[in-house]
Image (tube, rainbow, N blue to C red):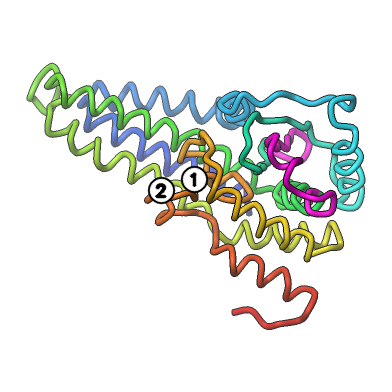
């Protein structure tokens, strides 16, 4: 099912990308966008994880760098019947984490420096179990491809701004690049990028919470971690791109951006309530 969703998403994003190229550059722009979209589909399928990790300057960890994190992850992968993913560290004080890759055999889990300073061992174990759950549920490729395309669409918006400033090469629709088309794309392209993010179902976070809690055997530790991560994200800024915000366990842009209105993350209160219900048996609607 997720394979079908992945190819459907790639098709929709290709159409969107080509349409934007046509508005900006006419027939030539549409042709160029189609070529670029084809290259991006190929690259995002095989290398999107490396692209996202590079965006955040993630450094691959060795066992000597983080022996406790390695032991914890190995134990959880055994419980979840998963291959061991590569582990990465991202510089930054905001505590956060995400998983990426095209499948369980080609997966990576990245954590920020701040997460080990804030969370207890049990809470960090809950976070790692959540990220491994994304790998186990095979939805990491969908999120990573969406991040790659959303970033490209946002880049087209910047191109549209320049087209509007310099007036384009021609007012002819065949040529594209007119100030009007630039203004339209400057407004619509970022919205399209946000809609791409929102196309990543919020249910994947609920499912990863549930699967991760079962894997770790401690739903309350994950609930406690989410509560503390959410509070820290509100106080500590992170240099994250809106296109990749949906990949993190908590929204890294939550601290006062209107992007919050388009968050792909479910309400934190509901995520915590569902985890607590796994222990206390409360009914969550």
Residue at the spot x=12%, y=28% of the render?
179
Q: Nearer the viewer, residue 273 or 92?
A: 92
Image quadrant where residue 168 sits: top left
Image quadrant where residue 203 sits: bottom right
Q: Nearer the viewer, residue 114 or 240?
A: 114
Q: CA distance from mark 2 to mark 1?
A: 6 Å
Q: In what element is the residue under mark 1? A: loop
Horizontal relation, residue 66 to residue 5: left or right = right
Where residue 58 appears, as percent x and y from the top left, is 66, 26
Horizontal relation, residue 10 to residue 155: left or right = right
- Tag 2–tag 1 contact (CB < 8 Å): yes
What residue sits right under mark 2 in the picture?
257
Q: Is residue 41 above or below residue 268?
A: above
Question: Which of the numbered marks, if any, corresponds to residue 253?
Answer: 1
Residue situated furthest top in the rendering: 169
Where residue 48 appears, as percent x and y from the top left, is 59, 30
53 part of magenta stretch:
no
Density class for disc 1 (Cα within 10 Å; few <14, some 14-19, many ≥20) is many
Density class for disc 2 (Cα within 10 Å; few <14, some 14-19, many ≥20) is few
Q: Nearer the viewer, residue 104 or 203?
A: 203
Residue at the spot x=86%, y=52% of the render?
80
Q: Which residues are magenta?
A: 103-124
Q: In what element is the residue under mark 2? A: loop
Count the labels in the image: 2
Residue at the spot x=63%, y=36% of the render?
93
Where residue 236 appears, as percent x and y from the top left, is 56, 43
Q: The C terminus appears in which quarter of the rendering?
A: bottom right
Question: Which of the numbered marks, if any, corresponds to residue 225?
Answer: none
Q: Is residue 150 above or below residue 8?
A: above
Where residue 181 appears, as percent x and y from the top left, is 16, 33
Residue at the spot x=78%, y=48% of the render?
124
């Amino acid at each position: 099912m997720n394979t079908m969703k992945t190819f459907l998403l790639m098709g929709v994003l290709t159409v969107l990308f080509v349409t934007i190229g046509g508005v900006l550059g006419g027939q030539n722009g549409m042709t160029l966008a189609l070529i670029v979209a084809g290259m991006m589909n190929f690259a995002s399928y095989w290398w999107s994880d490396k692209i996202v990790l590079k965006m955040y300057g993630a450094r691959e960890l060795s066992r000597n760098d983080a022996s406790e994190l390695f032991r914890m992850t190995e134990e959880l992968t055994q419980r979840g019947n998963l291959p061991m993913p590569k582990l990465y560290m991202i510089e930054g004080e905001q505590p956060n984490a995400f998983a990426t890759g095209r499948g369980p055999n080609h997966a990576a889990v990245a954590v920020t420096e701040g997460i080990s300073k804030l969370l207890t061992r049990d809470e960090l174990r809950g976070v790692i179990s959540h990220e491994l759950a994304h790998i186990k549920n095979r939805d990491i490729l969908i999120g990573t491809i969406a991040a790659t395309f959303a970033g490209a669409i946002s880049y087209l918006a910047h191109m549209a701004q320049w087209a509007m400033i310099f007036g384009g090469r021609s007012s002819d629709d065949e040529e594209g690049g007119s100030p009007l088309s630039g203004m339209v794309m400057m407004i619509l392209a970022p919205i399209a990028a946000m809609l791409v993010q929102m196309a990543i179902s919020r249910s994947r976070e609920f499912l990863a919470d549930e699967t991760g809690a079962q894997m770790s055997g401690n739903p309350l530790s994950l609930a406690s971690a989410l509560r503390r991560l959410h509070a820290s994200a509100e106080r500590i800024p992170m240099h994250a791109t809106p296109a990749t915000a949906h990949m993190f366990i908590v929204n890294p842009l939550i601290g006062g951006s209107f992007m919050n209105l388009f968050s792909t993350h479910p309400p934190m209160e509901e995520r915590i309530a569902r985890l607590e219900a796994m222990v206390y048996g409360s009914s969550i609607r």
